[in-house]
């Protein structure tokens, strides 16, 4: 479990002090993957550095598994950091050490015997699917492989909390998929709390249970992914699943956006909607998928002129939030 | 010194060709001993000192501005004195430590001081070229400050430090020749007493060839060690330990 209470970080003093994190509050439960997104310079890496106490918070506290890390002395911190695995932006592997030697480092720091270290390193490399690359140096590995070595190293001391700062940034989709499924597997098997920092919305959708958007040191919006996706007024939900371009409606028809806003939207909602309105429903575009077991998404449909209030009411009964896009001319650029 | 005992009486005479090896080889041995002992001291003191000064600097593990400034000044003073002047200036100190102001022991003291000042800067500079993210990675993995210095700073800087050590060793060979002028023995002493004071061009020529060859050998060994300690330069595509060994041997 990771908890932040009123976490504030200020760099610099006096006139040129910048508040990078401003009274942040959130909790990541055991077995939860919590994503933090935000534009460059939002303070994401600073947040990560505050959670493993590489940077001391200016005020507020960081709680990991019930221990208030921000109260610990430097010597106590060295011990406490061992319970937090960190995966770094751009892997952070040591160039003069092989994959196995990199993974072994945290164990060496702890003073684990060489035999036990060898056994554990083999197990960890196997876990991330790189058993056959143990003797390779970082420059002999692909970006995705390097990142997986970084994950193995982060797991070396059996942490209960994993901190990942841009672990998938700059990787191709296949490598990203491999890392994402590895992280989910680790969460399921080991009950890890994972703080997953990224600026890639697609990855958030794949990996996270909850998400917070950080901007200028504030959390501007946060919640469970499914809830955000099912609430049409959520900016973060829209950013996670942007509206794509759709076909223009026939002349005389108008375009409507329907967003899944409830857990149980019937799969034959197009037929049902047509029946309720007594009018044909033409499908102009749709993007629907399952995220964490819930169906989410949205569709753009064309409807003949009908009283807008009737459409909204009929859609609402089916669990859809309806909104008219335009009367006649479809707004092709409506990509939030 | 000892090698020259038998030739002391032959003033104003050139050394016969056949006796040159007997004159020069022991002198070479003395030079190597002088430089070897000096470099051992330089490395033992310079590596910790360089690591300390690097980590006292802003952004270091135990940042301390005033301590850094003081230490930095001390080293700069050591660096800025020409070796001949340093050697003369610290004669009382050398005497205190070695009980003499001639011979190899007396040369090793000023050479070590000059060498430590030089090498400390080389270590500091090598550590600066290591990405600071390494130290953060090590700390986040639960390393103590000493472990961070050993594994994330010095270890990663090894090729660069060896490169600097090569330059440093060559400078020390040069200093040993200067030390030779105050009677420390070695190639420098031979060059000065025979080549310079007695105009024996053959001996002069031989000492030059020997110095050039020694410097070239040191450079060659240094370059190979740098290659051997840099995985990118050592391994091409394969990484099994046997083929790595082969590459190292071939290199
Ligand atoms: N050591 C520091 N001293 C002063 N300011 C800093 C320091 N580290 C970061 N900052 C500032 O804090 C802000 C947040 O930086 P941070 O690295 O946390 O951003 P980020 O969200 O991780 O960005 P990115 O997506 O580009 O990695 C930036 O404006 C940066 O200039
Ligand atoms: Mg960052």
Image (cartoon, coloured by chain):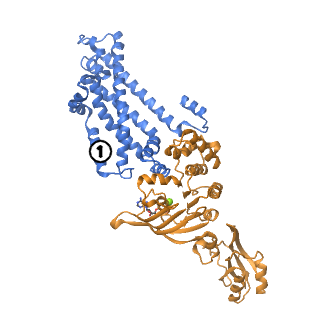
| Chain letter tied to blue | B
Q: At x 24% / y 31%, what residue is drawn?
A: B87
In the picture, the quarter occupied by the N terminus of chain A is: bottom right
Chain A shade in the render:
orange
Q: At x 63% / y 77%, what residue is drawn?
A: A232
Q: At x 38% / y 52%, what residue is drawn?
A: B59
- Judge whether A134 appears above or below A324 on screen: above
Within-10-Å neighbours for mark 1: few <14, some 14–19, many 20+: some
The answer to which of A159 and B78 lies nearer the viewer is A159
The residue at which mark 1 appears reads as: B71
Residue B231 is at least partly visible in this image: yes
Q: Is residue B77 left or right of residue B223?
A: left
The answer to which of A251 and A84 lies nearer the viewer is A84
Callout 1: chain: B
User: Where's residue B241, x and y in %?
Assistant: 59, 34
Q: Secondary structure at mark 1?
A: helix
The quadrant in which residue A253 appears is: bottom right
Residue B121 is at least partly visible in this image: no
In the picture, the quarter occupied by the C terminus of chain A is: bottom right
User: Where's residue A153, x and y in %?
Assistant: 56, 49
């Amino acid at each position: 479990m990771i908890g932040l209470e009123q976490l504030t970080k200020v760099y610099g003093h006096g006139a040129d002090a910048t508040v990078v994190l401003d009274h942040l509050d959130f909790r990541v439960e055991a077995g939860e993957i919590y994503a933090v997104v935000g534009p460059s310079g939002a303070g994401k890496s600073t947040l990560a550095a505050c959670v493993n106490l590489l940077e001391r918070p200016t005020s507020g506290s960081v709680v990991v598994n019930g221990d208030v890390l921000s109260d610990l002395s430097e010597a106590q911190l060295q011990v406490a950091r061992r319970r937090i695995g960190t995966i770094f932006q751009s892997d952070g592997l040591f160039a003069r050490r092989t994959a196995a030697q990199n993974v072994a480092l945290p164990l060496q720091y702890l003073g684990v015997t060489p035999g036990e270290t060898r056994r554990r390193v083999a197990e960890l490399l196997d876990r991330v699917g790189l058993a056959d690359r143990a003797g390779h140096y970082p420059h002999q590995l692909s970006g995705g492989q390097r990142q997986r070595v970084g994950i193995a190293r982060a797991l070396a001391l059996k942490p209960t909390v994993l901190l990942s700062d841009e672990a998938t940034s700059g990787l191709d989709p296949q490598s990203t998929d491999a890392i994402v499924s590895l992280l989910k597997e680790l969460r399921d098997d080991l009950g890890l709390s994972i703080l997953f920092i990224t600026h890639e919305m697609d990855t958030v959708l794949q990996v996270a249970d909850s998400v917070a958007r950080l901007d200028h040191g504030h959390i501007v919006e946060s919640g469970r992914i499914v809830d955000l996706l099912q609430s049409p007024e959520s900016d973060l939900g829209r950013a996670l699943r942007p509206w794509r371009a759709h076909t223009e409606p026939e002349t005389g028809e108008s375009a409507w956006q329907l967003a899944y806003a409830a857990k149980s939207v019937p799969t034959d909602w197009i037929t049902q909607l047509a029946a309720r309105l007594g009018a044909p429903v033409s499908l102009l575009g749709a993007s629907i998928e399952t995220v964490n077991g819930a169906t989410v998404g949205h569709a753009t449909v064309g409807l003949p002129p009908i009283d807008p209030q009737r459409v909204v009411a009929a859609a609402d009964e089916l669990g859809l939030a309806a909104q008219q896009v335009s009367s006649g001319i479809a707004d092709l650029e409506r990509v939030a | 010194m000892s090698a020259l005992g038998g030739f002391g009486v032959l003033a104003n005479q050139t050394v016969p060709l056949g006796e040159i090896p007997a004159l020069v080889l022991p002198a070479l041995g003395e030079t190597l001993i002088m430089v070897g002992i000096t470099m051992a001291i330089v490395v033992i003191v310079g590596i910790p000192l360089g690591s300390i000064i690097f980590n006292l600097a802003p952004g270091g593990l135990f940042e301390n501005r005033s301590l850094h400034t003081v230490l930095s000044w001390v080293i700069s003073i050591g660096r800025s004195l020409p070796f001949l002047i340093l050697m003369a200036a610290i004669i009382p100190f050398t005497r205190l430590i070695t009980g003499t102001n001639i011979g190899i022991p007396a040369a090793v003291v000023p050479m070590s001081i000059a060498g430590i000042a030089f090498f400390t800067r080389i270590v500091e500079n090598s550590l600066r070229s290591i990405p600071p993210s390494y130290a953060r990675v090590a700390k986040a993995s639960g390393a103590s400050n000493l472990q961070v210095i050993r594994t994330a700073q010095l270890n990663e800087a090894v090729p660069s430090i060896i490169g600097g050590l090569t330059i440093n060793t060559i400078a020390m060979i040069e200093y040993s020749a200067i030390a030779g002028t105050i009677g420390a023995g070695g190639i420098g002493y031979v060059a000065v007493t025979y080549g310079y004071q007695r105009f024996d061009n053959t001996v002069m020529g031989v000492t030059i060839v020997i110095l050039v060859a020694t410097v070239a050998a040191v450079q060659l060994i240094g370059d190979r060690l740098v290659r051997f300690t840099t995985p990118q330069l050592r391994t091409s595509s394969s990484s099994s330990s046997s083929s790595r060994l082969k590459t190292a041997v071939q290199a």
